[in-house]
Image: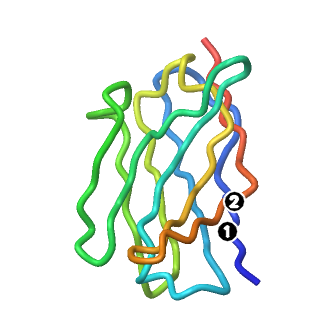
């Protein structure tokens, strides 16, 4: 079965950095566009960043541009989110999402909590 497992979340002070990882299993990773979403309490889920396959083109939410970087390693079946200059408003549960490039089949990870303190 398909699994997406995130890690790397935690508590960090404002201005700090974290690197999230999402490891996929049970799917042909190179056929999937990968996305990072986040959801803060009481707020709607927000698309933070995405990276395509196979070209690796990236897009970011305006709120994270210049601070977050998404990358992928197809050999490791992993996608990463490097988060720098973190702000308290970045506090949320971050989840990775895989969407097949043709079939549009979609999978979700369980999420990892990121808490940024002031």
Q: Which mark is residue 56?
A: none
Residue 78: image x %, image y %? 52, 73
- From this view, report whether residue 23 is shown above or below residue 41: below
Q: Report crowding for label 1: few under 14, some 14 to 19, many 20 or more residues within 10 A (C-alpha).
A: many
Q: Please give the count of numbered marks on the rendered protein.
A: 2
User: Which residue is rendered at x = 37% and y = 62% of the image?
Assistant: 71
Q: Report crowding for label 2: few under 14, some 14 to 19, many 20 or more residues within 10 A (C-alpha).
A: some
Q: Report the front residue among 89 and 60.
A: 60
Left or right? Give the position of 97 relative to 56: right
Secondary structure under badge 2?
loop
Q: Quadrant of the N terminus?
A: bottom right
Residue 69: image x %, image y %? 35, 48
Distance (Cα) linking label 2 and label 1: 4 Å
Q: Which mark is residue 4?
A: 1
- From this view, report whether residue 81 is shown above or below residue 43: below
Left or right? Give the position of 39 relative to 62: right
Residue 81: image x %, image y %? 46, 52
Residue 11: image x %, image y %? 69, 32
Q: How is the image coloured?
A: rainbow
User: Which residue is rendered at x = 67% and y = 68% of the image?
Assistant: 4
Q: Quadrant of the C terminus?
A: top right
Sequence-first tag of 2 and 1: 1
Is the residue under label 1 in contact with that under label 2 (CB below 8 Å)? yes
User: Which residue is rendered at x = 40% and y = 77% of the image?
Assistant: 102
> Which residue is the site of mark 2?
109
Quarter of the image where one finds residue 60 = top left
User: Which residue is rendered at x = 39% and y = 74% of the image?
Assistant: 101
Secondary structure under badge 1?
strand
Left or right? Give the position of 54 relative to 86: left
């Amino acid at each position: 079965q398909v699994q997406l497992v995130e890690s790397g979340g935690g508590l960090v002070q404002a201005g700090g950095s974290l690197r999230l990882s999402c490891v996929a299993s049970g799917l042909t990773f190179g056929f999937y566009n990968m996305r990072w979403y986040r959801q803060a309490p009481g707020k709607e889920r927000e698309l933070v960043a995405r990276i395509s396959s196979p070209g690796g083109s990236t897009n970011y939410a305006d709120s994270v541009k210049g601070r977050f970087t998404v990358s992928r390693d197809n050999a490791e079946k992993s996608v990463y989110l490097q988060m720098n200059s973190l702000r308290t408003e970045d506090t949320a549960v971050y989840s990775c999402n895989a969407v097949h490039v043709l079939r549009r089949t979609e999978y979700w990870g369980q999420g990892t909590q990121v808490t940024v303190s002031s």
